[in-house]
Image: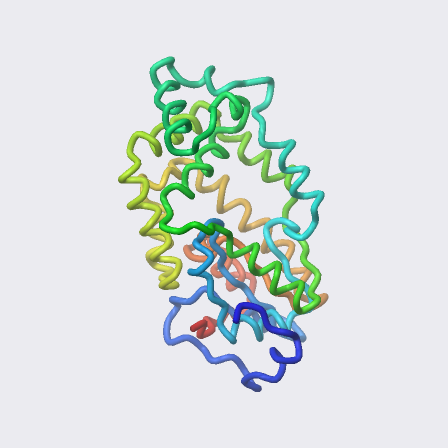
């Protein structure tokens, strides 16, 4: 059962959460450095088959022990979603046709007609990175696609936990605007032109996530085929540093459950390493 009430959470498995045998887990406990009570860190995935999302008792206990849930965005605020719709467009009236050759545009247009059953004209002004995100559900072997974040919001509401955001939609939009639109359009075209390869890469990402293989997750993010290219500092590292700066204050105020994309956790510039550098004990928790 995906959702549990607060009473059930508190009644299960008293005592400390069991440590994982190695670092291959998505769930981490943050303690020490003057914290009165532990906080928790969990890696999410933005697009997953609903049947592949399973929350362990340890995760449910961790969320139950926290006072507030922090995500990248305040996911239970309708204004965030509505604001996001207004920030999907490219600046200065740019259109996809301006970024591709006529022949390239035709290939993308044909894909949208054949696979998405939609006219590309409707999405002309949308940032190409957003358009790429529309392709990925077509690579998935299921009817119902959701995100781990959506399911966590449901769990938080069931447990009467407030959800807050580490970033605003305006900030995330500015990150996408910092990556040249032409570069984004190139990644969209590459995804569509090499659909089999794109599916294989996406499958490997899902497999690494569901196996909680942090080493594989870190490797995928540094792989040139992933499409991060020279934007890792912009998309991951700078944001990680900003989050840890906020958490240094937040966690000393109240215990929190922090849920951000799993790719932000591993590596020397990941949230785990940055928290440890600040003097916190970050312990892997068994999450099966």
Residue sitting at x 53%, y 34%: 176
Give how far across and how far down residue 41 sits, in percent: 54, 64
Give how far across and how far down residue 58 sits, in percent: 51, 75
Work out whether 218 lies above or below 179.
Answer: below
Coloring scheme of the render? rainbow
Work out whether 74 lies above or below 190.
Answer: below
Residue sitting at x 56%, y 69%: 30
The reply, left or right, for residue 285 in relation to residue 259 is left
Work out whether 78 lies above or below 252.
Answer: above
Instruction: Specify the farthest residue to the bottom.
Output: 14
Residue sitting at x 59%, y 17%: 93
The quarter holding residue 38 reads bottom right
Give how far across and how far down residue 191 sits, in percent: 35, 34
> Toward the viewer: 115 or 183?
115
The reply, left or right, for residue 212 in relation to residue 93 is left
The reply, left or right, for residue 288 in relation to residue 274 is left
Instruction: Specify the farthest residue to the top.
Output: 102
> Toward the viewer: 34 or 46?
46
């Amino acid at each position: 059962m995906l959702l549990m009430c607060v009473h059930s959470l508190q009644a299960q498995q008293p005592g400390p959460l069991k440590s994982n045998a190695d670092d291959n887990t998505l769930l981490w406990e943050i303690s020490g450095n003057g914290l009165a009570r532990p906080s928790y860190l969990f890696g999410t995935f933005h697009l997953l088959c609903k049947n592949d999302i399973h929350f362990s008792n340890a995760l449910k206990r961790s969320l139950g022990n926290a006072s507030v849930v922090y995500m990248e965005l305040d996911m239970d605020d309708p204004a965030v979603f509505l604001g996001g719709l207004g920030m999907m467009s490219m600046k200065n009236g740019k259109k996809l046709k301006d970024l591709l050759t006529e022949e390239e545009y035709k290939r993308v247009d044909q894909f949208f007609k054949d696979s998405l059953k939609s006219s590309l004209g409707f999405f002309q002004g949308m940032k190409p990175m957003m358009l790429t995100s529309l392709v990925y559900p077509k690579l998935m072997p299921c009817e119902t696609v959701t995100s781990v974040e959506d399911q966590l919001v449901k769990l938080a509401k069931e447990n009467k936990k407030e959800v807050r955001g580490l970033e605003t939609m305006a900030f995330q939009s500015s990150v996408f605007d910092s990556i040249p639109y032409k570069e984004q359009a190139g990644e969209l075209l590459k995804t569509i032109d090499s659909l089999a390869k794109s599916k294989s890469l996406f499958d490997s990402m899902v497999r690494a996530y569901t196996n909680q293989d942090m080493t594989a997750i870190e490797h995928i993010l540094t792989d040139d085929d992933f499409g991060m290219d020279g934007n890792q500092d912009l998309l991951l590292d700078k944001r990680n540093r900003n989050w840890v700066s906020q958490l240094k204050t937040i966690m000393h105020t109240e215990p929190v459950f922090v849920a951000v994309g799993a790719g932000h956790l591993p590596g020397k510039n990941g949230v785990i390493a940055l928290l440890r550098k600040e003097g916190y004990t970050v312990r892997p928790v068994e999450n099966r």
